[in-house]
Image (tube, rainbow, N blue to C red):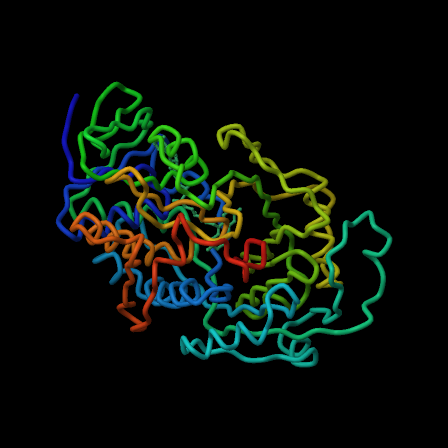
């Protein structure tokens, strides 16, 4: 089979599906290809799907604030309902605990500029507002077999509370909603087919070959392959002019029963970003999810092949993450056996994604989402559609980076921050927080 399209999007995760929707809205003939059996079955399915606004750079902060409005008005964003049901945004608030690698003054400055509501909490406010929390400062994070891990805190800490933060339930359904909306807007979805070759002609991309031998001819191909993105770049022969690279990393998220008072009277407790101890928590029905923030004392688990990632939680990681959560919530009972999942991040050196063109004309990348871009997906679709439109129209994005203006917030979001050729983001926390 040989078909033609205006654009091929490789990957129907939350990022690829969002890009497909926005390209289809521009009346392009779009084909989405995914090797899985449906949308959102890659790293998106393992996402904690936390919606928060704390990043180290303006453009990421502005994108996350704009995207929050899309999640809140999800049916409008999609242009209609979905018979599969709609993913839901739960506003729980989130507190970012004070930590040296993410200076509070800078964060507050960015929030004030963007108009994002926040409250500055001292230790007393933290303890009054988050039931069962301990406000000790333990920095830097320590391995749980380090005796210092159990030392009492000498100081206390506060944090910055974002009342508008929350999470989306569930992330896979969100990707399916975007894919269905893209289909309604005219996109074709090809599942259970893998892109095995990227074609070039006369110095630009000319299409892709699929695992069933069929060929899709297209002048535009978008790499939205999540943790497999490095492999796709290799197929396309791009990367020589990248100053930032991507690498897959295995990450676990665990489930524990919530400590008393955390989820109270049908109200879900706030998320807590706790780089002080090296963890984050998020409310879940009857309990909470506990994730990690790559503390320097723990080895990072880089992997070669995302397909070989063992999805089962391991005792060592479970104990490390949950013990840290139990320091923060001393009444949290640590279960005997691990419960949770492992997913894969597509990580860049500065934990900031790459949304860009490449040296191969027509080949674009929305990659390196570094465990922190689920929340931005609705805006990433718009950014990539604007980028592709401008660059295919002859614009020099490398010299004069494209920007978009948020439809809900009016904020300007520059794509230069996400350039493949950027100087590494020196303000990055060096963790999933970006
Ligand atoms: C454990 C975990 C927790 C996270 N928590 C948060 C959070 O709280 N908040 C937040 O904002 N973000 C979070 N993230 C990050 C967020 O989930 C990701 O940034 C986002 O889901 C990435 O989406 P994607 O579409 O790029 O990738 P994916 O969902 O992985 O989609 C890529 C798709 O490409 C397909 N594919 C790959 N190669 C090929 C090929 N050659 N041919 C055809 N198809 C191909 C795959 O099958 C896959 O479906 C988390 C991620 C993980 C893993």
* Residue 46 falls left or right of residue 364: right
Eyeballing the image, is 241 above or below 410?
A: above
* Residue 355 falls left or right of residue 296: left
* Residue 385 falls left or right of residue 63: left
Image quadrant assignment for residue 276: bottom right
Residue 332: image x %, image y %?
72, 59
Eyeballing the image, is 401 above or below 111?
A: above
Q: Nearer the viewer, residue 34 or 330?
A: 34
* Residue 281 falls left or right of residue 13: right
Residue 214: image x %, image y %?
22, 22
Which residue does the image show at 64% across and 62% down from the upper left? 274
Furthest residue in direction top, as rendered: 213
Furthest residue in direction front, as rendered: 399
Which residue does the image show at 72% across and 56% down from the upper left? 324
Which residue does the image show at 47% across and 54% down from the upper left? 423
| Ligand 1 visible in quadrant | top left
Residue 72: image x %, image y %?
35, 66
Eyeballing the image, is 113 above or below 179?
A: below
């Amino acid at each position: 089979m040989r078909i033609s399209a205006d654009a091929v999007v490789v990957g129907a995760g939350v990022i690829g599906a969002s890009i497909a929707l926005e390209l289809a809205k521009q009346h392009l003939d779009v084909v989405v290809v995914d090797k899985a059996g449906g949308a959102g079955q890659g790293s998106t399915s393992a996402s904690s799907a936390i919606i928060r606004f704390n990043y180290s750079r303006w453009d990421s902060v502005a994108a996350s604030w704009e995207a929050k409005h899309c999640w809140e008005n999800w049916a409008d964003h999609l242009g209609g309902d979905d018979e599969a049901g709609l993913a839901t945004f739960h506003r729980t608030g989130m507190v970012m605990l004070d930590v040296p690698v993410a200076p509070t003054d800078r964060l507050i400055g960015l929030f004030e500029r963007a108009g994002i509501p926040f409250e500055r909490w001292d230790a007393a406010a933290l303890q009054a507002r988050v039931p069962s929390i301990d406000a000790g400062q333990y920095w830097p994070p320590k391995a749980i077999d380090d005796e210092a891990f159990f030392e009492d805190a000498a100081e206390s800490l506060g944090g910055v509370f974002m009342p508008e933060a929350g999470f989306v339930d569930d992330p896979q359904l969100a990707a399916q909603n975007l894919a269905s909306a893209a289909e309604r807007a005219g996109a074709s979805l090809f599942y259970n087919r893998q892109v095995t070759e990227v074609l070039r002609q006369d110095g630009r991309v000319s299409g892709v070959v699929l695992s069933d031998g069929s060929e899709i001819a297209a002048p535009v191909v978008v790499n939205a392959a999540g943790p497999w993105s490095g492999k796709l770049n290799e197929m396309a022969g791009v990367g020589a002019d990248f100053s930032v690279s991507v690498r897959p990393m295995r990450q676990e998220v665990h489930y524990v029963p919530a400590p008393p008072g955390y989820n109270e009277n049908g109200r879900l407790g706030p998320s807590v970003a706790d780089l002080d101890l090296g963890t984050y928590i998020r409310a879940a029905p009857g309990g909470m999810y506990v994730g990690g923030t790559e503390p320097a004392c723990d080895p990072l688990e880089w992997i070669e092949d995302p397909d070989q990632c063992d999805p089962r939680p391991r005792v060592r990681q479970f104990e490390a993450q949950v013990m840290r959560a139990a320091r923060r919530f001393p009444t949290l009972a640590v279960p005997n056996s691990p419960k949770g999942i492992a997913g894969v991040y597509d990580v860049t050196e500065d934990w900031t994604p790459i949304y860009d063109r490449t040296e191969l004309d027509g080949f674009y990348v929305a990659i390196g989402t570094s465990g922190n871009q689920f929340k931005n997906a609705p805006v990433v679709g718009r950014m990539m559609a604007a980028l592709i439109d401008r660059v295919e129209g002859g614009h020099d994005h490398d010299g004069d980076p494209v920007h978009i203006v948020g439809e809900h917030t009016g904020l300007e979001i520059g794509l230069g921050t996400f350039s493949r050729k950027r100087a590494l983001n020196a303000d990055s926390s060096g963790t999933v927080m970006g």
